[in-house]
């Protein structure tokens, strides 16, 4: 049962990333990027 449980958890994790990824990426890209890469983006 341990193997099946691991497969189910992995499948849920992949599905979560597949659904949440496209929703989160535009929010990150549209947000204030200053400080993320260490450079000032205002110039």
Image (spheres, rainbow, N blue to C red):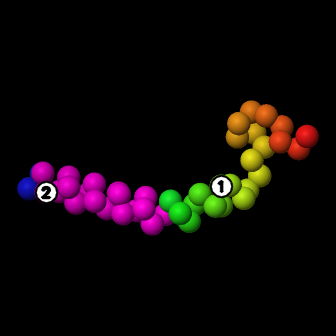
Name the disc covering residue 28, or none: 1
Which one is earlier in the sequence, the residue at label 1 or at label 2? Answer: 2
Depth check: give the residue in front, 1 or 19: 19
Residue at image coords 45%, 66%:
19
Q: Quadrant of the N terminus?
A: bottom left
Mark on residue 4? 2
Please name which of the two marks, 1 or 2, marks the residue nearer to the observer.
1
Instruction: Using the image, determine if residue 24 lies above or below residue 32.
Output: below
Residue at horizontal 79 percent and vertical 34 percent from the top: 39
Residue at (12% x, 51% y) in the render: 3
Q: Looking at the picture, how far across and down is residue 40, in whole percent?
A: 83, 37
Whole-angstrom CA distance, mark 1 to mark 2, is 35 Å
Find residue 41 and report its image quarter: top right
Give the farthest residue toward the left.
Answer: 1
| Position of residue 1 in the picture relative to residue 14 (left or right) | left
Q: Residue at x 71, y 36 (%)?
A: 37
Crowd around label 2: few <14 · some 14–19 · many ≥20 (10 Å): few
Q: Position of residue 13 (x, y in %)?
A: 35, 57
Magenta stretch in the rendered image: 3-20
């Amino acid at each position: 049962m341990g193997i099946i449980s691991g497969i189910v958890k992995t499948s849920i994790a992949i599905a979560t990333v597949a659904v949440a990824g496209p929703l989160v990426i535009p929010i990150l890209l549209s947000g204030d990027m200053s400080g993320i890469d260490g450079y000032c983006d205002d110039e």
